[in-house]
Image: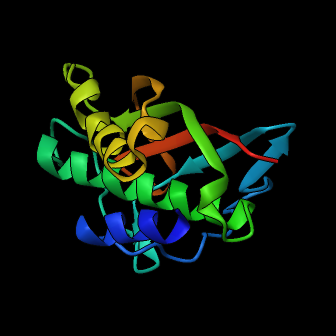
Amino acid sequence: MSDAIEARLKDLGYTLPAAAAPAANYVPFTISGNLLYISGQLPMESGKIAVTGHVGRDVDVPTAQRAAELCAVNILAQVKAALNGDLSKVRRVLKLNGFVASVPEFTEQHLVINGASNLIANVLGDAGKHARAAVGMASLPFNAAVEIDAIVEIDV
């Protein structure tokens, strides 16, 4: 299944990068029992933030959705690292929390985070169907437009 997941990602135009190292005093993931908690992931691509600024002013919705997709790809990279390369241990993505740097009058955060939700569901099938939150923020680290964290149920 691990190879099938990466093949579906490739079909969508993405390759799993190496999991990013933490940018501050935290760990990229923790495991408690059969729950894997992934720290917030930014829209990193080729080692840098790919989409910066505020949605509704600097960033349009389609570009922000792509940022959310990149966050989801980076979540999957962290999941792979946490599971020693074995994505077949993913039982289900339980929840995504999506944060969108946006201007106060922007109210379509849910559409932005659909980028991540759609990618996760397309790549993992039923195991990718999840609960979620989509929240507007005044700003995010490194001026990123989107940040997303995750809770994943795994086989132990």
Side of 32 where 46 appears, left or right? left
Above or below, 134 relative to 30: above
The residue lying at 28 percent from left, 27 percent from top is 109
Side of 143 where 12 appears, left or right? left
Determine which quarter of the picture holds residue 117: top left
Side of 7 where 66 appears, left or right? left
Residue 75 x/y as whole percent:
53, 54
Side of 63 where 32 appears, left or right? right
| Residue 60 visible from this viewpoint | no
The residue lying at 40 percent from left, 31 percent from top is 138
| Residue 28 visible from this viewpoint | yes
Residue closer to the observer: 135 or 115: 115
The residue lying at 19 percent from left, 19 percent from top is 105
Residue closer to the observer: 109 or 87: 87
Q: Residue furthest front?
A: 1
Q: Residue furthest bottom?
A: 46
Determine which quarter of the picture holds residue 106: top left
